[in-house]
Image: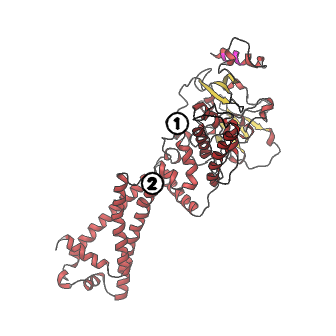
Amino acid sequence: MDIIKRYYLFLQLLFMNWIGKAGTILATTAFISFFIFEGLSLVGVFKSAYTGIVTYFIIPMIFIVGLILLPIAWYKQKKETGTTLRHVFLEQLDAKEIGSQNFWEKVIPVVFILTIVNVLFIVAAGSSAMHYMDESEFCGTACHTIMGPEWQVYNASPHSRVPCVDCHIGEGVQALAAAKLNGAWQAVAAMFDLYDKPIGTPIHNLRPARETCGKCHWPEKHYGSKLVKINRYKEDEANTLQFTTLNLKVDASIGVGSGIHWHIAAENEVRYSSLDDQRETMIWVEVKRADGEFHRYTNIHLADSVFTEIEPRVMDCVDCHNRATHVYEQPDAAMDLALAKGLIDPELPYIKREGLAAIMTEYPDKTTGLATIDERLAAFYAVEYPELENSNLRSSITAVKAIYDRNIHPKMKITWNTYPNHLGHKVEFGCFSCHNFMQHEQSDGCFRCHNRHIVDEEGDYISDECTLCHSILSLGEEDPLQYLLDQEFRTFEEHKNEYFRGEYLKNF
């Protein structure tokens, strides 16, 4: 009897009752479906993340359920008939055809082959599932409502080609197992709506920066200084362009680790404790001295407060670059960037003012918001500038809507400044420390530590001098190098401008 006929006879045995029939049909259908779906995905017919969930999770689960039903069917049949599996088999088939003496000789090869096939299939499906779960597309799209906002800003970030797992999952079997167990809980949370809205930050179990950021960036590298020119547009009719130019002292004055990256240089160590472990309000900050001792600065604003101190955190890259990948913008800066790139036409009268007003209005949902922004801007120019002939009006409105679409996600309760960026700091210049568009809501950034209410025992504070981290070549001026000009300055603060000019030339 050849192997095909033996397999056919074995299938008859599996069909001994309705449980066996169900198990056989489920296992066989899942087995065939897996290869069909996998083949269609390889040729590009299926590209959706949900196809991967079906192929690598649902189908293998159906296959395993089918296999589990088979021994249950045999047990049920044996219990009902009170006979052994051999007798059950002989009862189902023609004894003359199978022969009572060579029962196991005919059955065991089939069982052995099917067992190998089943094991290989489960291993292949499991391996494919693990590989699929490591893809960024799975992380961002499998739970669309929850991770949709993060996926959207990730794709527009400087690290959009870095896989999610490179930062969110550690190296080794233990880290992988922990990540998958955490993922199982996340699946349960998503199913029963147990997740936070918005997703809480900071992520305290994120891999150490030396294992993630440090793979491509490293503090020992001498970066020198970096000249940054920022285009800002006023909210007047002409959208007047102003320049802020900074020469960032990444590692500028003395050598490696002497500038902004001094905080993470190998020979230095900064550690701190923050209120509620949110890394926003510092309880105290400590700096390691040359003798190995730590020098502490304490927040006098919390002197009379009662709180539970969290375990100190050693400062690393993400304490400043906390939105290095999932970057949510500020409305003012987002509009300025779109204007500078030409996505929004600065020739459109009041486009900065009207665009800001449109995207900062609160809408009940994103669909309504996008539609209203479109109608609002189109109506403004139709009423106020009926004679306007600008071919870029429609594309400019689309760009304004794109800013709103990227940053605002009502379903996850994400609005402006839900996720503040600690890189840099909010503007603090006299009256404008309060009377400045949206700035009072932004993160203190550097000034979380570099301020005058965190002092040591002698009352000294960590320097908050403007030129500690950058030279200022222009600050909202008409010329990007305004403070280097030899002519009379175009601002009443000549003493300030002369100081900035001298400070820059002194270092370069």
Side of 336 relative to 433 (left or right): left
* In the depicted structure, whether residue 80 falls above or below residue 412: below
Residue at the (27%, 78%) spot, across then down:
12
SS of the residue under disc 2: loop
- Which quarter of the rendered picture does the C terminus lie within? top right
Instruction: Identify which amino acid the numbered label 1 is placed on.
Output: Gly
**Residue 357 versus residue 133: which sits nearer the camera?**
357
Quarter occupied by residue 318:
top right
Region of the chain picked out in magenta, as a range? 500-504
Answer whether residue 398 is visible to the viewer in this image: yes
* In the depicted structure, whether residue 122 falls above or below residue 254: below
Q: Exactly how many numbered labels are in the figure?
A: 2
Answer whether residue 312 is visible to the viewer in this image: no
* In the depicted structure, whether residue 342 falls above or below residue 495: below
Residue furthest out toward the bottom: 81
First in sequence: mark 2 vs mark 1: 2
**Residue 314 versus residue 330: which sits nearer the camera?**
330
Residues at marks 2 and 1 touching, judged by CB atoms closer than 8 Å? no
Residue 450 image offset from top left, x and y in percent:
72, 32
SS of the residue under disc 1: helix
Instruction: Identify which amino acid the numbered label 2 is placed on.
Output: Ser
Q: Which residue is mark 2?
A: 48
Residue furthest out toward the right: 304
Which-is-in-front pick, marks 2 and 1? 2
Residue 16 image offset from top left, x and y in percent:
32, 81
Chosen colour scheme: secondary structure
Q: Which residue is mark 1?
A: 214
Residue at the (30%, 64%) spot, across then down:
117
